[in-house]
Amino acid sequence: MKQLQFLIFLLFCSKAMLAQTLGGNTVYNFVTQPNTAQLSALGGVNISNISNDVGMVFQNPALLRPSMQQQLNTSFNNFVAGIKNYSLTTSWYLNKPQTNIAIGINYFDYGILTQTDAAGNVFGTFKPVDYVAQLMFSHAYHTHWWIGGTFKFINSHYAQYKSSGLAVDIGFNYYDSIKGFQAAFVVKNMGSQLKTYTNGVKEELPFDVQLGITKKLAKAPLQFSLTAHHLQTFNTLYNDTAFNAAYGTITNNSSFINQLVTHLVASVQLMIDHKVEVTAGYNFLRRHDLNVYATANGLNGFTLGAGVLFKKIHIRYATGFYQQNLFHQVSLNFNWKGDAF
């Protein structure tokens, strides 16, 4: 009961941080993109999934465990519009302080673009890139609790426009292995720009308060997750009035129910003989944002994934629709020493 009261207290404390704004009005929104295939297959937002995948700690440092000692997660995402995403995460367990640490990077390559002025005059080409480098740690607290923290260095480079920033995540995790239940709470991206793109006013980071639960069934090889994001504000919907006026439509259904469910991401995982993993996810907010006028797709918001879990290497794949485009993400998990999982 005390643990539940503590989580509720943290949630109410986060309400005081309303100065932070939502995506579309913030800088460095690439830090919200999933860094590994399992997370992408789970709907892109998940902080409580029960898994021995070190790549998942990129989103919640409290998921970092001693069993992930010297585990390496590498990931490649052939994203939409020619965007390439590369990620790497690895961890160690420190015996004396009984603390887990991990480092990771999530890198975005947007290819080579033509550089022009406002009139369309071509001045050459440039190669925009974004990346976030993270240092993560976790420590056990009593029997079922874990606390974790993440320090982020964020860098963005678009031709002559360069920017960098620092951010911190704080995560809490409750895990009962006997009941197959896990809950998590994370406050993400508390920080500031170090350098702005134009040496002007600093922009706000994509602050997010998330709460998630995962339940593994005792008599079936299934586990279900439900994650709530952007709990610091109720209305997460974006309304482009200029677009609505141009196309004569209202794309922002701001009913109470719609505002409520767009905070949620639901997912399910099926384990077949502990060797094959099948995952499906549904992101309500992503579906809402992608179902704009004349470009809706019945599969927007859905993600799928599969994994083959060998003794010494785990291979996972994820895909999902972004309107008429599919992304393809592949991740590999293995141990530096070649040990079995």
Image: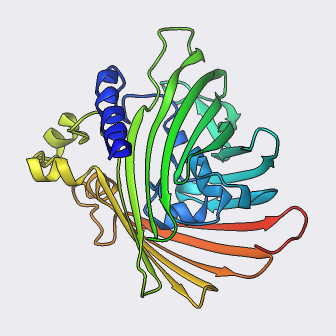
Q: Nearer the viewer, residue 212 or 4?
A: 4
- Residue depicted at x 67% and y 40%: 137
In the rendered image, which quarter is residue 13 located in? Answer: top left
Task: Identify whether 65 is placed above or below 180.
Answer: above
In the rendered image, which quarter is residue 181 located in? Answer: bottom left
In the rendered image, which quarter is residue 318 located in? Answer: bottom right
Q: Residue furthest right?
A: 337
User: Measured from the top left, where is residue 169 in percent x and y?
Assistant: 54, 34
- Residue depicted at x 70% and y 44%: 105
User: Measured from the top left, where is residue 60 in percent x and y?
Assistant: 54, 47
What is the quadrant of the C terminus in the image? bottom right
Q: Is residue 70 visible?
A: yes
Q: Nearer the viewer, residue 241 or 88?
A: 88
User: Measured from the top left, where is residue 83 in percent x and y?
Assistant: 60, 52
Q: Is 38 on the left or on the right of 289, as rendered?
A: right
User: Measured from the top left, where is residue 88 in percent x and y?
Assistant: 73, 52
Q: Is residue 251 visible?
A: no
Q: Is 177 on the left or on the right of 254, as rendered?
A: right
Q: Nearer the viewer, residue 119 or 227?
A: 227
Q: Nearer the viewer, residue 112 or 170?
A: 170
- Residue depicted at x 36% and y 24%: 20
Numbered marks: total: 0
Q: Is 178 on the left or on the right of 235, as rendered?
A: right
Task: Identify whether 335 is placed above or below 233.
Answer: below
